[in-house]
Image (cartoon, rainbow, N blue to C red):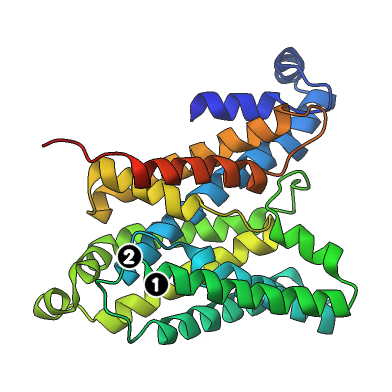
Amino acid sequence: MGLLVLLSLSIGVADFSWSGILQSLLTQSANSDSSLLLVSRIPRTIAIILTGIAMAVAGMIIQVVLKNRFVEPSMVGATQSAALGLLVVSLLFPASALIVKMGVATIAAVFGMMLFMLLIHRIPPTDFLMIPLIGIVFGGIIEAVTTFIAYQTESLQMLSVWQFGDFSGVLAGRYELLWLTGALCVLAYIIADKLTIVGLGDNIALNLGISKRQVTWIGVGMVAMMSAVVVVTVGMIPFIGLVVPNIVSRLMGDKLRRSLPAVALLGASAVLLCDIIGRSIRYPFEVPVATVFGVVGTVLFLWLLLRAPAEQ
């Protein structure tokens, strides 16, 4: 990850040199290199890291809460509902503050996930494939409604900004909301043991004195808020919450106290790598990181599904 951070800070269209940064430190005066680093390169790298951590941890939480390894925030209607709420508040109250838009998007994401959980309430937990299938259809319906509203109001271009995760517009002052996702990830680590117990089953949680309903709704609320903040700030990025937790789970098991730091580290590194590929593959143009990770994530997930289990 350290190497990827250095690469992320070094790659870009604007002229940049580390010798200029060293000269600025020695002379204690700002120059073009130091200004570019502080205004653009560092904020973008921090935004990438926080986004990767947030979506990977959110995917891990929702998989544990639903006891299903084939779901992620975009498969339970969270990101689509957040985009719908963001579109509605932008159309009705275009001059509202960013925190208001984020709040509406979070509420919409929570309602979307509540509706999804009502839909799957009668499905037996052993039917692992039916839950993600319902999630894909449910998310597609919400996305279709959002696209229809955007088409009728001539807002498709604005909607496309939220539907494709891209960090090209991240500058100092435009990403700070993502620090909230970092705080939520810390909260997830604090209650990691309770989440692990809930993931073991209803009877075990009851016998150990854990309120399944309370922990479940705390997890749902955190996933909804993380998804909303990421959509508001950089847009949707699929497959992070699906691929990264599955890889870490295969390597380290399902104990969240142990695996959450690895999930966060791998999620941040994966998004950093895909962003570097997106900036380099058609230099000086950029391919959105959501497109790159969509391809990489699909290949990795198919590999996870098709690879033979390791011999004990």
Picture layout, residue 185 above or below residue 288: below
Residue at horizontal 54 percent and vertical 64 percent from the top: 74
Residue at horizontal 73 percent and vertical 69 percent from the top: 98
Q: Is the C-beta separation of discs 1 and 2 under 8 Å?
A: yes
Q: Which residue is mark 2?
A: 68
The reply, left or right, for residue 237 in relation to residue 280 is left
- The quadrant in which residue 32 appears is top right
- The quadrant in which residue 127 appears is bottom left
Picture layout, residue 55 above or below residue 120: above
Question: Which element type, helix, strand or loop, lies under badge 2?
Answer: loop
- The quadrant in which residue 176 appears is bottom right
Q: CA distance from mark 1 to mark 2?
A: 8 Å
The reply, left or right, for residue 236 in relation to residue 308 is right
Residue at horizontal 31 percent and vertical 64 percent from the top: 64
Give the crowd class for mark 2: few <14, some 14-19, many >=20 residues within 10 Å.
some
Residue at horizontal 60 percent and vertical 37 percent from the top: 274
Question: Which element type, helix, strand or loop, lies under badge 1?
Answer: helix
Foreground label between 1 and 2: 1
Mark 1 or mark 2, which has the lower sequence index?
A: 2
The reply, left or right, for residue 304 in relation to residue 78 is left
Picture layout, residue 254 above or below residue 250: below
Q: Is residue 93 visible?
A: no
Q: Is residue 238 visible?
A: yes
Relative image position of residue 197 (x, y in whole percent): 19, 67
Looking at the rendered structure, the kind of residue marked 2 is Asn
Most distant residue in the right direction = 154
On-image quarter of the C terminus:
top left
Which is more toward the observer, 37 or 1? 1
Relative image position of residue 169 (x, y in whole percent): 78, 47
Relative image position of residue 245 (x, y in whole percent): 37, 50
Q: Which residue is mark 1?
A: 131
